Image: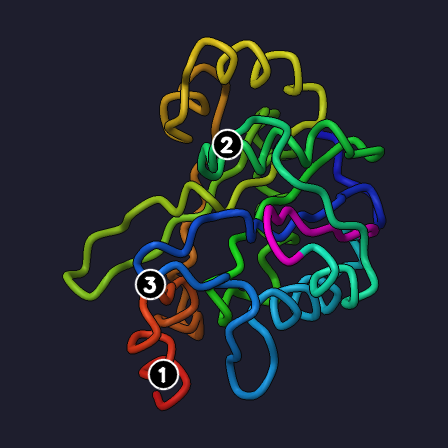
Amino acid sequence: MTSISPGHITAIVLAGGRGSRMGGVDKGLQNFNGTPLALHTLLRLQMQGGGLVGEVMVNANRNLAAYEAFGVPVWPDTISDFAGPLAGFLTGLERCETPYLLTTPCDTPLFPLDLAERLAEALAREGADIAMAAAREEDGQLRTQPVFCLLRADLLGSLAVFTQAGGRKVDAWTAQHKTVVVPFDRPGDDPRAFFNANTLAELKALENR
């Protein structure tokens, strides 16, 4: 087992979607408690325990100047036509200069502040290529959260081949590699940590809870 050193994780905020379920608005720029979702996510990444997260960047395909105002690098998809989260994973891996990449969506504003630590611990312990978060949903089932992944940066070639062949599903790609699933269901874990806002109404409800 080799633990992951402080600063050896680059994090990327995935804000490149169409926002179709929000009526086509740019989801990452919608406010959560007065702060744009993507900026809120950035700040939460910078607050991760253990000092594991060094550089943070944003993957966005619209309104790039608005995202650049957050003060971190902004990179659009290198695959055209809003190809989904894996396009953001690919962009992150192409730009990553550390051994690991942490992926987080922009629409899940309560994700845990120990996300990086727990994924890194499991990845190192299991000698895995990928660590993926999982959380209990309201029906009590533990479900994976495939857009919350810690990836070895040397998976770039594998993901490039997969996406060039038309692959778009995160699970289908991660299944090709040794993946450890990390449950976030300890006593004291926030049961709402992985709630995501797909509509403006859900975003408002999340603010009010």
Residue 108 - label: none
The CA distance from mark 3 to mark 1 is 15 Å
On the image, the x and y values in percent for residue 15 come to 56, 53
Task: Identify which residue is drawn at 37% across, 67% down.
Answer: 197
Residue 39 vs residue 3, the one in the foreground: 39
Depth order, front residue of 169/83: 83
Alpha carbons under labels 3 and 2: distance apart: 22 Å
Q: Quadrant of residue 102?
A: top right
Q: Position of residue 171 (x, y in %)?
A: 37, 29
Instruction: Classify 178 as above or below 4.
Output: above
Q: Report whether 42 appears left or right of 16.
A: right
Q: Is the N terminus in the top left, top right, bottom left or bottom right quadrant?
A: top right
| Label disc, if present, on residue 86 of the rendered structure | 2
User: Which region is colored magenta?
Assistant: 54-63
Residue 195 can be seen in this image: no
**Quarter assignment of residue 103:** top right
